[in-house]
Image: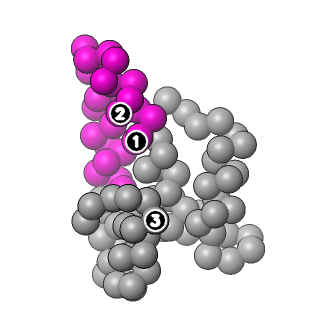
């Protein structure tokens, strides 16, 4: 499940660290979170879609690695990011 281009630009502008930032860990985590949420709702309706479930698990793993990176480098930014995205850490 891909994100509409407009929604992706909204997320990037909301979480970017500086003006030209499009790929920092914060932005990547926010985009992954949005994709995970959309795919989770799809899987609630389509319980037997195992290929999408595998993709969901891969995205969750990627987000977990990125969150670990942010936590290791800046603890306050990590806590703020968890609060803004409503993720339990």
Q: Residues within 10 Å of mark 3 (few under 14, many from 20)?
A: few
Q: Earlier in the sequence, mark 2 or mark 3?
A: 2
- Tell me the quadrant of the picture where the C terminus can be found: bottom left
Q: Is residue 36 depicted above or below 17 in this figure?
A: above
Q: Residues within 10 Å of mark 2 (few under 14, many from 20)?
A: some
Q: Secondary structure at mark 2?
A: helix
The percent position of residue 85, horizontal first and vertical second, equals: 43, 59
Q: Residues within 10 Å of mark 1 (few under 14, many from 20)?
A: many
Judging by the rendered image, the residue that carries numbered circle 1 is 36
The range drawn in magenta is 36-63
Q: In the rendered image, which quarter is residue 48 located in?
A: top left
Q: Main secondary structure of the magenta part?
A: helix
- The residue drawn where x is 26% and y is 17% is 47
Residue 40 relative to residue 16: left or right: left
In-front residue for pair 49/45: 45
Cβ atoms at labels 1 and 2 below 8 Å apart: yes
Q: Is residue 76 depicted above or below 14 in this figure?
A: below
């Amino acid at each position: 499940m891909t994100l509409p281009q407009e929604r992706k630009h909204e997320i990037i502008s909301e979480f970017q660290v500086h003006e030209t930032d499009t790929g920092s860990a914060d932005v990547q985590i926010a985009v992954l979170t949005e994709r995970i949420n959309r795919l989770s709702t799809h899987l609630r309706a389509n319980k037997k879609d195992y290929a999408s479930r595998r993709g969901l698990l891969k995205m969750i793993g990627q987000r977990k690695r990125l969150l670990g990176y942010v936590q290791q480098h800046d603890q306050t930014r990590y806590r703020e990011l968890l609060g803004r995205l409503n993720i339990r850490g």
